Amino acid sequence: MHVTKEHHEDRSEPDDRGMYDWSYVYDVYTFSDGELELKFRRYSDDAATAALVSPMGCDQLVGCQALLGAAIEHLRETEGIASVQAYDPGRGAFSPFGNAVRSAAASGKLSQVDADCLVDVVDRSRDAV
């Protein structure tokens, strides 16, 4: 598994006092293994949480279980991540990983067997820490 970490700072233009209307400071972690690639984002103001941002759909994780488990284990062990999130199609927003996977299964985007497998991968990586 190959891991990269990129730091990003996105801000509005400063006003007359040097203040910003908005500012996002975050790191993007890319985990790759051959053709497979996963990306997680961690905002500096919520450093204990990482969100899976690519691929966005849980249904696209089928076949990536080994890389997903290794990536989450790396984030927990080396970066101090306590919570992993993924896009929840039911809410239209990011949710804790297990909730997002169950929502994808409930909406028919993911089979229940695949959902159970993905949740198990995340649970096993938690137990390994």
Image (spheres, rainbow, N blue to C red):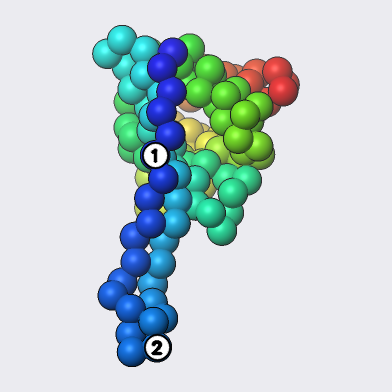
- The answer for how far apart the CA atoms under marks 1 and 2 are is 29 Å
* Residue 65 disc label: none
Q: Residue furthest bottom?
A: 16
Looking at the image, which residue is at 41% across and 81% down?
19
Q: Which residue bears the numbered disc 2?
A: 17
Q: Which amino acid lies under the numbered mark 2 shown in the image of this protein?
A: Arg
Is residue 103 at all visible to an observer of this figure? no
Does residue 128 sit above or below 18 in this rendering? Answer: above
Return the x and y of residue 67 as percentages of the image width and height.
Answer: 45, 16
Residue 81 picture quarter: top right
Return the x and y of residue 88 as percentages of the image width and height.
Answer: 43, 44
Which quadrant holds the C terminus?
Answer: top right
Looking at the image, which residue is at 36% across and 12% down?
33
Q: Is residue 36 left or right of residue 7?
A: left
* Residue 6 disc label: 1
**Total of numbered circles in the picture?**
2
Q: Is residue 56 left or right of residue 52?
A: left
Return the x and y of residue 36 as percentages of the image width and height.
Answer: 32, 17
Marks 1, 2: nearer the viewer:
2
Looking at the image, which residue is at 59% across and 49% down?
47
- Name the element at disc 2: loop
User: Callout 2: 10 Å neighbours few (<14), some, many (20+)?
Assistant: few
Looking at the image, which residue is at 42% across and 53% down?
93
Which quadrant holds the N terminus?
Answer: top left
Does residue 43 sit above or below 20 in this rendering? Answer: above
User: Callout 1: 10 Å neighbours few (<14), some, many (20+)?
Assistant: few
Q: Which amino acid lies under the numbered mark 1 shown in the image of this protein?
A: Glu
- Name the element at disc 1: strand
- Along the polypeptide, which appears first: circle 1 or circle 2? 1
Is residue 4 at all visible to an observer of this figure? yes
